[in-house]
Amino acid sequence: MISTIEETRVPAITVGSPEFTSVPGRWTGLARQLPALPLAILVPFVLIALFADWIAPYDPTEPIPGATIFEPPFWMEGGSTHALLGTDFQSRDLLSRLIFGARVSLIVGVMGTLVAGSIGTALGILAGYLGGWVDQVIMRLTDAWLALPALVFAIFLATMLGPSMWNIVIILGAVYWTRYARVIRGEVLSLREREFVKLAEIAGGSRTRVIFRHILPNVLNSTMVLAKPDDRRGDHRRSLAELSRGRRAAARAGLGLDVG
Amino acid sequence: MGQFMLRRTMYAVVTLFILSLTIFTVVRLTGDPVTLLAEPGARAVDLDRIRAEWGLDRSLPMQYLAFAQNIFTGELGKSFNYQMPVSTLYFQRLPNSLELALAATLISFVIGIPAGIISAVRVNSAWDNVGKTVALLGLSVPGFWLGLVMILIFSVWLHWLPTSGQGGWQHLIMPSLALGWYFAASLLRLTRSSMLEVLRSEYVKLARLKGLPGYVVLAVHAFKNALIPVLTLAGVNLVVMINAAVIIEVIFAWPGIGRLLYEGIFQRDFPLVQGVVMQAGIMIVVINLIVDILYAYIDPRIRLTK
């Protein structure tokens, strides 16, 4: 048995060897797999966010010298090309504020998802793997927090912590971890019974080792799926997009981060 | 079965206990309500008097006990601002919220379920793609933006519909659309995946082999079974829409529970916020409990798992 496997094994390919470079279509194949349309939408946003300092025509926090408040955009009557999208109530350039806002939105969206995903995954693994009263405590807490209206909860935490970018990240993490915890716990419950986990335990692997080496890599896929703007099982999983929606909603309620 | 129901009910009670502790703590972290209740520049003596009047001078455990007692009596405490029991306020607003939530649910059904079925029956067809696009838009377009754009188009430019407030059916169209679209998207996705699952099952294959016409297989055999999770989601959605349609109600000045909650938060009206959140929490937990028990009744395998 073993010998046949040895014989049929594909010869190892190392980077730099002739086999590697001669595999036809390796990179073109990868390029074809990239999601073109999503990238076409996202990449400009990321670039704008990264290079906001160079792109924005004005300082987003300072009034434009000589401009009046509430100037309309350039295509409307009374607008001018020096402030393309007009000015706000403090005669600051709206275009520049939008450009800098992209940076804040991206950081908050990505970091909020990361924080929520990390908290939820960690608690889900603990609940599923340890079981017993740890499981009970974590799952009842999850149920209770799911019953709280998420937006209301976020508004509360915002009045408490005050509007700043990192506070919003903390708030989003504190509000949206629950759905990760629920799904990941379910996954861990079935993983725990699988042979490779049992064998790792029999081989003397500590709980920490089993969690980090055997459980965590197998649930990360689900964590990623939950972070996508997806609602496949309809349980209102908040996605990255929805996280920044929550932020915008909070901003409307006068609690959001003001750019500047 | 009895043991299962007992365990589930106990879980629900524990969940509500944690919820009450959480909301009790969180409202108290937002600040001192007395400064908002008194006139600016009020003397410290007067502030203390107000504090004593509302029982805010007592220790936190005592305040929690009073809150818990108010939950059990069903009164939910007395609002600082309205000087009325929260339950009275809640049930005054409930018909308005129910009107909006039912209209939004109707819209989400009308859009979500047929589109979900078509997407499932004709996978990867043009119809499926249209459905997916509608769903993705519904999930990613923020309700408040949709609301504001609709106000701009239909009220400000075309003068077809009133901008806000409650009244005839004209007042209901825009807020229920803005609220319902998001839920339509999630219903569409769930209907689609649920139908796909059912259509692959043996009994649907058998129904087809028996030679039943395609629409009978779809309507009688597949749709009815695919509907169970969809209705569960719709039930939970309805509760969420009744209690937490905050943004939409604020934009359209709809006198519902969401706006009551919104006012309560900004005026630090502790009993009001605690009461409304607990009311919503109880509704959600009880619905979930009933669903769990019904599922266990239908499918005995569920009873055995924890």
Image: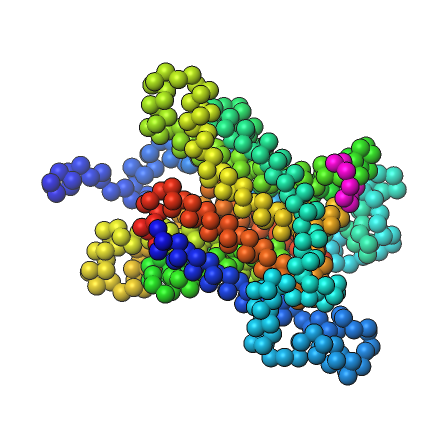
Residue B199 or residue A165, whichever sits in front? B199
Residue drawn 21% across the image and 56% down it: A199
Residue B252 or residue B133, whichever sits in front? B252
Q: Is residue A110 above or below residue B31?
A: above
Is residue B169 magenta-colored? Answer: yes
> Residue B75: image x %, image y %?
64, 63
Magenta span: predominant SS is loop
Which contiguous range is marked in magenta?
B163-170
Q: Is residue B268 left or right of residue B222?
A: right
Q: How is the image coloured?
A: rainbow
Residue drawn 39% across the image and 17% down it: B212
Residue A65 or residue A92, whichever sits in front? A92
Q: Is residue B137 left or right of residue A131?
A: right
Q: Is residue A32 visible?
A: no
Q: Is residue B191 above or below residue B272?
A: above
> Residue B229: image x %, image y %?
46, 39
Residue B27 or residue A243, whichever sits in front? B27
